[in-house]
Image (cartoon, coloured by chain):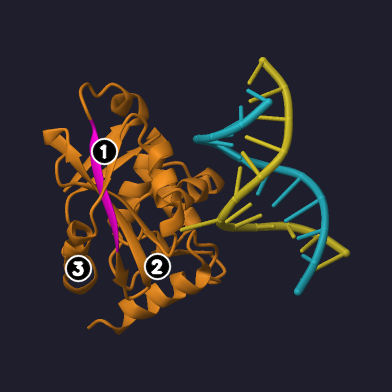
Chain colours: A orange, B cyan, C yellow
Amino acid sequence: MITNMLIHEYNNIIGSIEIIYGNFISPFGICSIAVIDKPIELHGKVCFISFRDQKNTLSHLCKHFKRAVFLENNSIAKNYEHKIFYLSESPPLFLKGTELQIKTWNALLNIKAKESLCYEDIAKLINRPKAFRAVANAIGRNPISYLVPCHRIIRKDKTLGGYRWGIKTKQDILNYEASIP
DNA sequence: TGTGGATCTTGTT
DNA sequence: AACAAGATCCACA
C-alpha cells in the first residue's frame, strides 16, 4: 500500500511531522530506514531506505522532509529487517516527489523480481518515451531503495548502469533475488 | 571502444 | 529566466 504525495501537498501538511529512523544489518551492509510516526494518517509508512550510508542519513532526511522532527530508534528499525529482506512482505510506503518522479517510482513497483527492464522501458511505461534521460534521473533519486526496486533497471545494452549505493550493491541485490526460488 | 548530439527534468543561480 | 548536470541511448568512426 502506497501513499503518494506531490511536493506541494507535503508542504501543505498541517501540524507536526515526526519520523523515526535507525539502522540494522542487512544482507547488503548497514541499512538505514525511516518510518513516519505522525501525522496519524501517515503512521507506520516507510519513507526512506538506504545502504551503507548511515553517516548521511539524518542530513538527507532533514533535506527531504522539511519541517519534520527526527527520532533515532534502532530497535524499531530492526523490526523491519525480516519483513523486508526475508519475507518480501512490503510494509506500507510513503513516496513524495514531483509528478514525473512519482509516476516513475510507481512504474518500478510493478516490476517483479527477476525481471529487468531498461531505462527507456520505464519512460515508455509512463508515456514519456523520449524522456528516458529524465526518468533515469528520477530513478536515481528513489528514496526507498530495495522496496522500490530501482536495482532492476539496467541499461539497454545489458550493462548494469548506475546505482546510488554502488554498482556492486546493485549486482549483489540482483544475485540475491535470482537465488530466491 | 570512444565521442558527440539528442532529449527532458531538476536544482541552482 | 537561464543553465548545467544527470543511474541514457544512438550513430558513426
Badge 1: how crowded within 10 Å, few (<14), some, or many (20+)? Answer: some
Question: Could you tell me which residue is drawn at 49 percent across and 54 percent down?
Answer: A120
Q: Give the range drawn in magenta.
A: A17-23
Q: In this view, does A132 lie above or below A4?
A: below
Question: Could you tell me which residue is drawn at 30 percent across and 33 percent down?
Answer: A68
Residue A107: % across, % down: 33, 50
The first of marks 3 and 2 along the sequence is 3
Check disc 1 and report its element: helix, strand or loop: strand
In the visual, does A140 lie left or right of A71?
right
**Which image quadrant for residue A147?**
bottom left
Q: For residue A22: magenta? A: yes
Check disc 3 and report its element: helix, strand or loop: loop
Task: Give the CA distance from mark 1 to mark 3.
Answer: 21 Å
Provide the residue designation for mark 3. A88
Q: Mark 1 lies on which chain?
A: A
The numbered disc on residue A116 is 2
Q: Visible in this render: residue A118?
A: yes
Kindly identify the amino acid type of the residue bearing the numbered disc 1. Answer: Asn
